[in-house]
Amino acid sequence: MNTELLELYSDYLLSAFSHTTATGLSAMTGGAISHDRITRFLASEEFDSAALWHLVKQMVRHLEGEDGVLIIDDTIEEKPYTDESELICWHYDHSQGRSVKGLNLLSALYQIDDVSIPVAFEMVKKTEWVFNEKRKKWQRKSPRTKNEHYRLMLWACQGNRIEFRYVLSDVWYSSSENMGYI
């Protein structure tokens, strides 16, 4: 992985005030990096939770301690105008009390003192179709529940030997199965 280009791309995303594009990043560098190079970089590999861990492991090891906590939460990045797919589809947003179209992401942050580092994530992909009898229509469904994703992220963090004292999360993840796993 080209970490230099990843750093530049991440900084660009964080500092942008409006839409971000590979062409915009290329223009920002005065053409030193072509938009084709950026596009190839983004398509070169899948950025998954294991790749994230590889990037942050050294920093976590430097900072971790017995007072560290693992914070697990989910968020929906709304994409109301994007075509529906396995990744961008309808998800129930408990903060709004309704379903919204977008990306549903579960993330795990390692926090110690005033530093927070993302250490794992799972994208909710709804790859199955089921018929909703109540609404009389077909809808997408994920083969894994959010609680299963939650436990998988905990398992990965334990497997990566991250030192933490507590796990913090929304009440939505307080099932007896999750509490027993913790």
Image (spheres, helix red, strand yellow):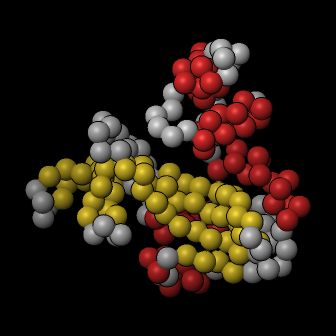
Q: Quadrant of the C terminus?
A: bottom right
Using the rendered image of the protein, determine whether residue 3 is visible from the camera's viewpoint.
yes
Residue found 77% across the figure and 32% down from its top: 4
Residue 161, quarter of the rendered image? bottom right
Q: Quadrant of the N terminus?
A: top right
x 69%, y 48%: residue:
52
Compared across the picture, whether 76 is left or right of 38 comes to left
Q: Residue furthest right?
A: 62
Q: Could you tell me residue 87's position as x and y percent?
A: 41, 44
Q: Name the residue nearer the viewer: 119 or 7.
A: 7
Q: Position of residue 120 (x, y in %)?
A: 65, 57
Q: Does residue 168 lie above or below 134 as drawn?
A: below
**In the rendered view, would you say 13 is above or below 110?**
above
Left or right, 76 with respect to 179, comes to left
Q: How many marks do you count on the picture?
A: 0
Q: Position of residue 60 (x, y in %)?
A: 81, 60
Q: Evaluate whether residue 39 shows in this view.
A: no
- In the image, taking residue 146 as reference, residue 26 lies left or right, namely right
**Location of residue 122 (image quadrant):** bottom right
- Using the image, determine if residue 153 lies above or below residue 141: below
- Residue lying at 74% horizontally and 70% vertically, measured from the top left: 114
97 horizontally vs 59: left or right: left
Percent coordinates x, y for residue 23 in the rendering: 54, 20
